[in-house]
């Protein structure tokens, strides 16, 4: 949920290498970042803290690198891509290289996907060749589907 | 026949998707709060049954709607639509498409529609739309309608407020009608039929079909005739689990053509039903206002040459070895004939059971009461019982049957003054029959092809005892129509009031030539009855000791020629008593030439000698000609000439027919003139098999199987 | 002259258990066919509530009687009719799809307005004979298609 972003970030890996001058760190070998319910697993992680506390940029690569986090309504969001870039200040993930993200009601696949965790907004860009297209799948409307999350508009019961 | 319409193959939809799941392919996609989604760049939306393509699409899970815009195409099994905007409501599963072009996939039909609503239960609903089944480049006719409904698994589509255009000229307005949907060739709207003949003048009939419920329907066909006035034909049909039937009512108020312009009507009620597992009921009741109704106004159910209409009501019970039928059998006889007898009722009970040593025991029994409207005709109650013991045997190469029957009949006859009949008569007659048949075959070589020829001799000895029956009236009995198939029947009369005494041997021989996939190419049958003693039953004059030699030949000569002949030759006078020959040349289904000849030396004291020619030939890709000419060579006059041309294209057809034939109208005295002719010119818009049209129609002349 | 007794008049051995059903239960043609099949010592069921493994099924969809004019008297009244008895039915062998078959049986017949009741009795008699001929024909076609089916599939 939202309070994850207030939590400290812990990183674990087999091997770690720091570069104090330009404030970069490199982790390698089943790397795991966790911040509250936010978890990223990857083979390699590069952390760029040069912009100071709170603006770090985490670049995790793997085949694939995986992300998962619990939403406000308790449902899980999971994603995977060859490269997952987590910008802490904008609370956004950008997934590149057969990226895939799955939420409760929909899942998106494409070359590159931008997930703004603050606005809960997924933007996927593809290209016109058949291989480059974005594929979105909506799950069947479960009849007992209750109110959607944080709907700005008034509650609307299913007909 | 050019190929007009090929039903579209089922679109290869993403059937890997689950029910209700939707997959969207696009160049860009944006989803907010897992609820609102926008797609751009040749968007393809797929579900299990539907495929939609568009430039852009918006999903709103909150209102459960999907909107696609920008050269949109919608495709499912039934319909393909292209338009600018589509809206799908996922909860009610209803789709709305604005001003679109559509093509039906399973039925030949396309057009434009201001609005199309497609729902799972409600089916396809075209609002303010046009419809035509003609190819797009030559739209001969179209319909503009405020509403066309095609509901799933309904055999008919419904059209409301339809304006019918031919080449942009409005021709007809119909508030309501329906058309068959599953008729792929052509969505055959019930077209009007246009006729003009000497009996009705010019007549136009426009059937209107009302599909009241899935198993009830009503067809109303008003028919305007210049010479006679307005006739209304109605047909109500019903079909339930156990019962099916139809009611026809036809009414013509004050017929201008008749001197006293009386009203004329025809009614018909047919029903067949199953009350329980073994009990059936059936009804076939018909009636009409006067003898000339069918001759003057025509009928879809009776031929103008028919002699009577049925009035029967029946009930029957069937079980494994028992069958009981009870029937009221009455008739409406056309013309001035002595009123025929009626069976009110006629009850038959048949019981059959197997006995040891595979013999069979059967009881056939009847109880009937006969009366007739002719007041001085005798009436009778008849009880008949005929136990039979039968020993049937068959194996690969032979058949054998030995049968013994006792026929006991008891009559109670009334109203018999000044006749030779007795009030009470009992008749007991014994009958014995032995029948044997064998089957031989040998391989033969015919024009170099290996075939099998069979030789099937048959023989039967029949003995029936004699009892004088002159004190019994004739109620349901008359001479039987004699031909080859009746040789072994051993019955000279129908019904039971006369049982002829026999002491005769019947010999028959059949030879077939069968090709190697078991199709008969040639079949010749000969048969004759040899009377060992004269039959004493009155009314059966028989000078010679043998019947006419009966012969029947069916022959397929090559692949295009067929021949069929039947003949009965009286061996004592060596004269042909009856013969029929027909020869047909058939190059293809629509290239046929058939010549036939019929001769009967004496049929109800008249000689029949008739030659007929029927031909059907294509004039061009779309035009087909059919001609028929029947000549009564005995009176040297033409009995029927018929010629018709039919134009058939992908979406419409017209048949133009001209015919002239002998009229069998009854005059006021109820007798028929012998030299009155009728001629007529007809235009039909529905597709009609001209070969079977007209008085004599057409049939392939032979029956090899 | 080379003739010998025919070999295959009756039904082949493989057809011992048949089911004969029709759209109208207990219809006359169905009863005639069942009676003739009994002559071949074959076990016949009329509906599907049995557990027996069937060799073949025959379903009679429709049998219609039609009339066509053959010749006229001088008054234009009909002299001879042709009765056309059209049968539509299906043969289905175990594990195969159903084969639709249609054939006609025809008989010549003559009406007589002076004795309509008697002639309707004759029509019943002729129809009964046509049904027997039709049942015989169905049995022969059953045997034929069984042989063809054996040839094609070979087991």
Image: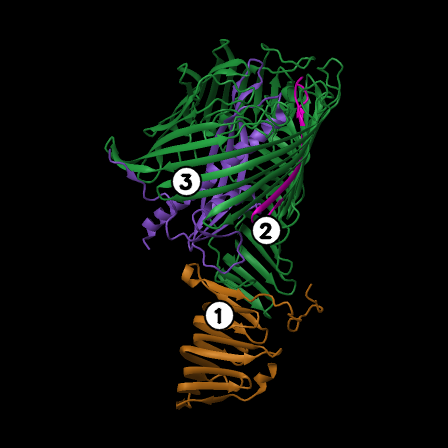
In the rendered image, residue B383, in percent from the top left (x then y), is placed at: 65, 35
Q: Residue C43 carries which label?
A: none
- Marks 1/2: CA distance? 28 Å
Residue that label 2 marks: B85
Q: Which chain carries label 1?
A: A
Q: How crowded is mark 1: few (under 14 residues within 10 Å), some or many (20 or more)?
A: many
Helix, strand or loop under label 3: strand
In the foreground, A69 or B92:
B92
> Do the dots labelled 1 and 2 sit on one chain?
no
Foreground mark, 3 or 2?
Answer: 3
Location of residue A68 with respect to A20 vertically, above or below:
above
Q: How crowded is mark 3: few (under 14 residues within 10 Å), some or many (20 or more)?
A: some
Query: Can the viewer see residue B168 in this picture?
Result: no
In the rendered image of this protein, which colour is used for chain B? Answer: green
Query: Can the viewer see residue A20 in this picture?
Result: yes
Q: Which mark is residue A113?
A: 1
Foreground mark, 3 or 1?
Answer: 3
In the rendered image, residue B300, in percent from the top left (x then y), is placed at: 61, 28
Q: Which of the image's four quarters has the C terminus of chain B? A: top left
Location of residue B358 with respect to B642 vertically, above or below:
below
* Tag 3 and tag 2, C-beta contact below 8 Å: no
Q: Which of the image's four quarters has the N terminus of chain B? A: top left
Q: Which chain carries label 3?
A: B
Residue that label 3 marks: B400
Which stretch is magenta? B317-341
The image quadrant that residue B223 belongs to is top right
- Is residue B339 rendered magenta in the image? yes
Chain that is orange in the image:
A
In the rendered image of this protein, which colour is used for chain C? Answer: purple
């Amino acid at each position: 949920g939202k309070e994850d972003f207030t939590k400290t970030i812990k990183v674990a890996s087999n091997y770690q290498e720091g570069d104090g001058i330009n404030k970069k760190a490199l982790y390698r070998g089943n790397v795991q970042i966790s911040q509250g319910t936010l978890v990223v697993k990857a083979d390699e992680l590069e952390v760029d803290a040069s912009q100071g506390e709170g603006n770090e940029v985490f670049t995790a690569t793997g085949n694939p690198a995986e992300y998962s986090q619990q939403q406000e309504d308790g449902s899980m969001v999971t994603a995977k891509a060859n490269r997952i870039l987590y910008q802490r200040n904008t609370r956004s993930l950008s997934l590149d290289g057969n990226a895939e993200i799955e939420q409760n009601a929909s899942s998106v696949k494409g070359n590159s996907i931008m997930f703004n965790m603050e606005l809960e907004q997924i933007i996927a860009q593809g290209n016109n060749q058949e291989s480059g297209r974005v594929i979105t799948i909506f799950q069947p409307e479960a009849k007992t589907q209750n109110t959607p999350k944080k709907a700005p508009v008034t509650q609307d019961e299913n007909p | 026949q050019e190929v007009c319409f090929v039903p579209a193959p089922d679109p290869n939809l993403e059937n890997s998707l689950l029910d209700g799941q939707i997959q969207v392919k696009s160049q860009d996609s944006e989803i907010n709060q897992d609820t609102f989604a926008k797609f751009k760049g040749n968007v393809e939306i797929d579900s299990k049954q539907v495929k939609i393509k568009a430039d852009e699409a918006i999903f709103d899970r909150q209102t459960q709607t999907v909107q696609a815009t920008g050269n949109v195409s919608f495709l499912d099994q039934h319909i393909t639509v292209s338009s600018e905007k589509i809206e799908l409501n996922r909860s009610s599963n209803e789709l709305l498409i604005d001003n679109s072009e559509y093509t039906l996939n399973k039925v030949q039909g396309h057009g434009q529609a201001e609005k199309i609503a497609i729902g799972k239960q409600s089916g396809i609903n075209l609002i303010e739309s046009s419809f035509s089944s003609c190819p797009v480049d030559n739209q001969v006719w179209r319909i503009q309608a405020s509403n066309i409904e095609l509901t799933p698994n309904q055999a008919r589509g419904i059209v409301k407020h339809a304006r019918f255009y031919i080449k942009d000229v409005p021709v007809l307005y119909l508030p309501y009608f329906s058309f068959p949907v599953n008729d792929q060739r052509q969505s055959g709207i019930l077209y009007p039929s246009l006729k003009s003949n000497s009996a009705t003048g010019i007549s136009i009939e426009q059937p209107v079909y009302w599909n009241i419920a899935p198993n009830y329907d009503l067809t109303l066909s008003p028919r305007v005739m210049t010479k006679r006035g307005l006739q209304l034909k109605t047909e109500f049909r019903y079909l339930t689990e156990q019962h099916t039937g139809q009611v026809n009512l036809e009414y013509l108020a004050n017929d201008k053509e008749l001197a006293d312009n009386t009203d004329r009507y025809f009614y018909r009620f047919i029903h067949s039903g199953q009350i329980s597992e073994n009990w059936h009921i059936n009804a076939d009741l018909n009636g009409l206002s006067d003898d000339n109704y069918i001759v003057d106004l025509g009928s879809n159910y009776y031929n103008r040459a028919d002699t009577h209409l049925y009035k029967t009501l029946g009930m029957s019970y069937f079980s494994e070895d028992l069958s009981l039928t009870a029937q009221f059998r009455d008739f409406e006889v056309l013309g001035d004939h002595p009123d025929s007898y009626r069976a009110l009722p006629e009850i038959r009970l048949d019981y059959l059971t197997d006995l040891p040593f595979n013999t069979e025991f059967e009881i056939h029994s009847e109880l009937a009461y006969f009366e007739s409207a002719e007041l001085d005709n005798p009436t009778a109650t008849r009880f008949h019982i005929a136990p039979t013991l039968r020993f049937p045997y068959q194996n690969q190469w032979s058949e054998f049957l030995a049968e013994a029957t006792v026929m006991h009949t008891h009559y109670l006859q009334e109203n018999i003054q000044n006749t030779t009949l007795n009030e009470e008569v009992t008749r007991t007659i014994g009958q014995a029959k032995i029948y044997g048949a064998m089957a031989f075959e040998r391989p033969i070589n015919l024009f170099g092809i290996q075939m099998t020829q069979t030789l099937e001799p048959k023989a039967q000895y029949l003995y029936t005892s004699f009892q004088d029956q002159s004190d019994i009236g004739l109620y349901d009995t008359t001479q039987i129509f004699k031909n080859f198939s009746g040789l072994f029947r051993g019955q000279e009369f129908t019904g039971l009031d006369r049982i002829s005494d026999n002491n005769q041997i019947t010999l028959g021989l059949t030879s077939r030539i069968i090709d190697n996939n078991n199709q008969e190419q040639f079949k010749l049958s000969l048969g004759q009855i040899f009377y060992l003693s004269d039959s004493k039953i009155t009314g059966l004059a028989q000078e010679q000791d043998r019947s006419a030699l009966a012969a029947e030949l069916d022959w397929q000569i090559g692949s295009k020629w067929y021949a069929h002949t039947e003949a009965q030759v009286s061996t004592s006078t060596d004269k042909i008593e009856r013969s029929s020959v027909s020869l047909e040349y058939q190059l293809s289904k629509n290239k046929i030439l058939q010549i036939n000849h019929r001769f009967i030396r004496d049929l109800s004291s008249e000689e029949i000698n008739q030659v007929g020619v029927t031909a059907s030939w294509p004039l061009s890709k779309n035009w087909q000609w059919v001609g028929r000419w029947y000549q009564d060579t005995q009176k040297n006059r033409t009995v029927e000439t018929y010629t018709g041309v039919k134009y058939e294209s992908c979406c419409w057809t017209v048949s133009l027919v001209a015919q002239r034939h002998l009229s069998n109208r009854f005059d006021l005295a109820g007798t028929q003139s012998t030299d009155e002719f009728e001629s007529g010119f007809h235009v039909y818009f529905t597709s009609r098999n001209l070969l079977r049209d007209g008085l004599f129609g057409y049939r392939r002349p032979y029956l090899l199987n | 002259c080379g003739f010998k007794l025919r070999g295959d008049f009756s039904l082949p051995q493989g057809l011992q258990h048949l089911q004969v059903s029709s759209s109208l239960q207990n219809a006359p043609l169905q009863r005639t066919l069942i009676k003739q099949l009994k002559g071949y010592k074959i076990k016949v069921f009329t509906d599907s509530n049995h557990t027996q493994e069937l060799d073949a099924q025959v379903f009679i969809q429709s049998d219609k009687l039609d009339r066509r004019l053959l010749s006229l008297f001088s008054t234009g009244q009909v002299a001879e009719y042709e009765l056309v008895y059209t049968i539509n039915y299906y043969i289905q062998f175990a594990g195969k799809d159903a084969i639709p078959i249609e054939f006609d049986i025809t008989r010549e017949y003559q009406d007589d307005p002076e004795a309509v009741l008697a002639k309707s009795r004759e029509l019943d008699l002729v129809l009964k004979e046509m049904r027997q001929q039709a049942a015989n024909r169905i049995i022969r076609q059953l045997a034929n298609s069984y042989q063809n089916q054996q040839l094609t599939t070979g087991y």
